Image (cartoon, helix red, strand yellow):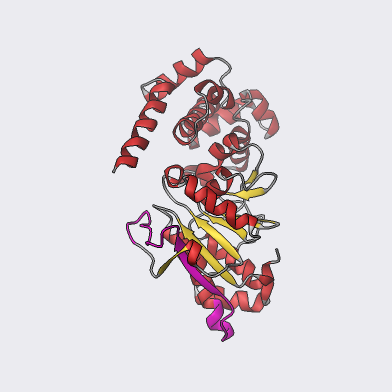
Amino acid sequence: MKLEELRRFGFLTLPSYSMIACANAIEALRMANRVTGEVAYAWQVVTLDGHPAAASNGLMLTPCAMLSAADRFDIVFVVGGVDVRNAVDRNVMAALRRLSREGVALGALCTGTFALAEAGLLHDYRAAIHWENLSAVREEFPETAFVEDFFCIDRDRVTCTGGVAPLDLMLTVIGARFDARVAAQVSAQFLLERGRAAGERQPREVTAAVATAPRPLAEALRLIGESIEQPLPTSAIARAVRISTRQLERLFARHVGLSPAAYSAALRLDRARALLRQTAMAVTDIGIACGFHSASHFSTAYRMRFGHAPRAERNDAVRADRERANV
């Protein structure tokens, strides 16, 4: 697949999809048509049954066509959003596999990447997904190399995070077909200073205090985040950022309000909570993946932070899924 050859775009909207992600992608194509003065791109919103899906904000995009009755697309983007796990059923996976067999390139916006992975269509691919879902999909789909980039283009798979990142992706698509001047014109129309390129990393959730923290603290936070499964002792982190252990502890106390060890534990427990809610991994495996080397230690630490055991968290998540399915 060559980006410059993409002309016809399909957007398969799943229930509770991200409106902002879908709209940003479509608007970039619309503006490219306007600034070039030609019908350079065509697009269509589709669902499996042809009825508009409600986005997470309760709105719907129309007109909407049935995927199987639509014209052939060069690429189909799965547009996900909240509660994507319940939105991806056997019919969605069968439709995506059929498109793949027919040689249609596949893409994803926001959590739509989960749908491609669940359908087995991201084996041995690199892929992007919103940072909030990154830990869960990495554990659940180890055969896929999930990256922290805003978007990722790997052969006939084009995956993108949510929010405004699809606009960046489409600027890259437009630039590949035309030139940087046209992409710049589209950016200017949307008051966008510049488009972000593939390979740029999406920012993680940080507090305002941490965002303005000194460089050693920022490096320490990055190290802790990258060593979830094998937590580093405070002394090792201090050596890595080239300050004393005492200096590191003072920085954490001033900017984070926790000791390095407490921050690491909280981060690992938050990661465990996300895995309990977003995956079907065994509770014991989640504990190991989050740096707890015994089930009892994991359960005790989890109970102290959240007030209940990990298994209770899993049971609550399953119950909530069933209730949503029955609504």
**Residue 177 in the image: x percent, y percent?**
67, 74
- Indicate the quadrant containing the N terminus: top left, top right, bottom left or bottom right: bottom right
- Image: 262 above or below 73: above
Quarter of the rendering containing residue 321: top left
In the picture, measured across the screen, residue 301 lies left or right of residue 169, that is: left
What main secondary structure does the magenta stretch of the protein show? loop
Residue 300 colored in magenta in the image? no
Residue in the foreground of this view, choosing between 35 and 81: 81
Residue in the picture at 54% in, 24% down: 261
Residue at the limit of the structure toward the front, as seen here: 69
Location of residue 146 with respect to 322 vertically, above or below:
below
* Residue 153 occupies quadrant: bottom right
What is the x, y in percent for residue 48?
45, 57
Q: Is residue 190 left or right of residue 229?
A: left
Q: Nearer the viewer, residue 82 or 265?
A: 82
Residue at 55% in and 80% down: 33
> Where 167 sits versus 270, above or below?
below
Whether residue 256 can be seen here = yes
Give how far across and how far down residue 210 sits, in percent.
51, 42
Q: Which residues are magenta?
A: 32-59
Where residue 324 sits in the image (x, y, percent)?
Answer: 33, 41
Residue beneath the point at 42% across and 54% down: 17
